[in-house]
Amino acid sequence: MAKRGLTKKQQSFVDLYLQNPDMNATECVRQSEYNTKYPDKVANILLENVRVVEAIRKAQARRSARTEITQDMVLKELAKIGFTDMRNYTTWGANGVILKQSDELTPEQTAAISEVSETISKDGGSIKFKLHDKVSALEKIGRHLGMFNDKLQLDGEGLNIHVTIEKAEKE
């Protein structure tokens, strides 16, 4: 009876895929034990392999259980960033820009703040206020919800696989 597990190369790909923050399958093929001129094609083949997809799904489920971090939690954090509004933090007009006091902000609002710093010099000073990248957060939410065409959903259990398609090099 043939072994029904993953090959060494497939396991290498799965391990890298789970560590890749962008879940970019093509990049994972490049970094894995596969030696190919066409990593995008190999990535597509791997992501169509039932055993590979199942190994990724199971590993993601184990990681979620182990860390107690759910997709809902991640989406809620991204939503705090993606749907924030600068008017929640400042007022501006003819008298300049005024930051709201930190105790006036909700925990959701403070989660969207990337940086607050103040520089003071003999000639005056400045305040730098920066929010996390709103567009990036919205893009990640949109990808998770399947709003964009560069994402391939492989099963109905929430496993979403990102595949980057590149043109094959001519030999």
Image (cartoon, grey):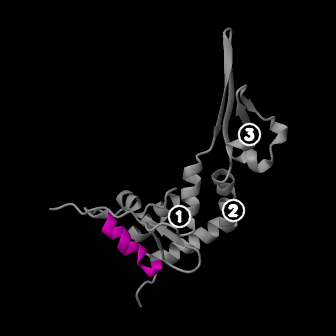
Quadrant for the C terminus in the image: bottom left
Q: Is residue 116 above or below residue 59?
A: above
Q: Residue at x 51, y 78 (%)?
A: 54
Pointer 2 or 3: first along the chain: 2
2 vs 3, front mark: 3
Q: Residues within 10 Å of mark 3 (few under 14, many from 20)?
A: some
Front one among 39 and 2: 39
Furthest-right residue in this view: 103
In the picture, measured across the screen, residue 20 lies left or right of residue 126, that is left
Circle 2 residue: 69
Quadrant in the picture for residue 114: top right
Q: Position of residue 38 (x, y in %)?
A: 27, 64
Report the mark closest to the observer, 1 or 3: 3
How far apart are the alpha carbons under marks 1 and 3? 28 Å
Find out whether residue 72 is within the magenta segment: no
Q: Amino acid at mark 2?
A: Ile
In this orientation, which residue lies closer to the viewer: 88 or 131?
88
Q: Which residue is mark 3?
A: 89
* Secondary structure under the numbered disc 1 in the rendered image: helix
Query: Any magenta on residue 46?
Result: yes
Residue 13 horizontal side relative to residue 156, left or right: left
Name, please, the residue furthest toward the bottom: 1
Secondary structure of the residue carrying tag 3 is loop
Query: How far separated are the C-alphas under marks 2 and 3?
Result: 28 Å
Residue with the mark numbered 1: 143
Type of amino acid under label 3? Tyr
